[in-house]
Image (cartoon, rainbow, N blue to C red):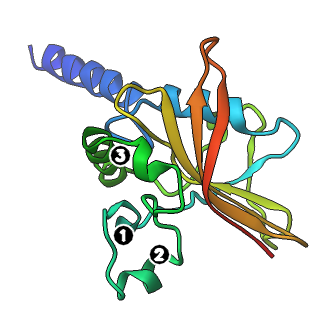
Amino acid sequence: MAIRKITTVLILLFTLTAHAQNYSSIISDDEISDFLNNIVNDSVPINTKILQWHKANFKDSLSYYDLDDILDEHLYSKSGCADTMFIQSDRAFLYKQFISIQDSVWHKSIVRTGVTRNKRKVNGYYYSIPLFSSDKRFAVIRKVHLGKFSSGGIYIYRKSYNNVWQQYCCIIKWIT
């Protein structure tokens, strides 16, 4: 009888860990992987470090002290398209996803191009975990390229009718 209980517990634990989410407790790893595989260039592997969001990215209004924290990457800035694009329920869902992020490193299986640890941080591509609108038609992601010329920003993608993600707008973009 004890062996049966132990076997049952082991089977349950194996089943739960086989379906565990690595990146978010709200959005499935498959949805994140599908999105990244759709937007990432096949010839360039991404760096293992996941770009992090900051809680100030999601505030509706900013104080003077918030500006140092987010380095001008405010999701709902008046100059960006997200200010009028996301209704309050979408904003709440984006924030809920932000606080449910569970990992800070991409695993090799997430994108078909592979993940690489670039020790010198030259020609490195970095991506945040994408955050989806409540209807999953829009996704917001931070991405950065570090190299001879570096660039980055917050980008919004829209899912087309044939389920292909296309860049819709860029909220903040910087180039050096």
Distance between mark 2 and mark 3 Cα atoms: 17 Å
Amino acid type, label 2: Ile
The residue that label 2 is drawn on is 70
* Location of residue 47 in the rendering, given as x and y in whole percent from the top left corner: 71, 56
Residue 2: x %, y % from top left: 11, 20
Q: Are marks 2 and 1 in contact (CB under 8 Å)?
A: yes
> Residue at left 35%, top 88%?
65
Q: CA distance from mark 3 to mark 1?
A: 13 Å
Q: Which mark is residue 78?
A: none
- Tell me which amino acid carries mark 1: Ala
Could you tell me if the residues under marks 2 and 3 are in contact, i.e. CB atoms within 8 Å? no
Q: Secondary structure at mark 1?
A: helix
Find disc 3 in the rendering and name its residue.
Answer: 94
Identify the element where label 3 is drawn.
helix
The amino acid on which the numbered mark 3 sits, given as a three-letter code, is Leu
Q: Which residue is mark 1?
A: 56
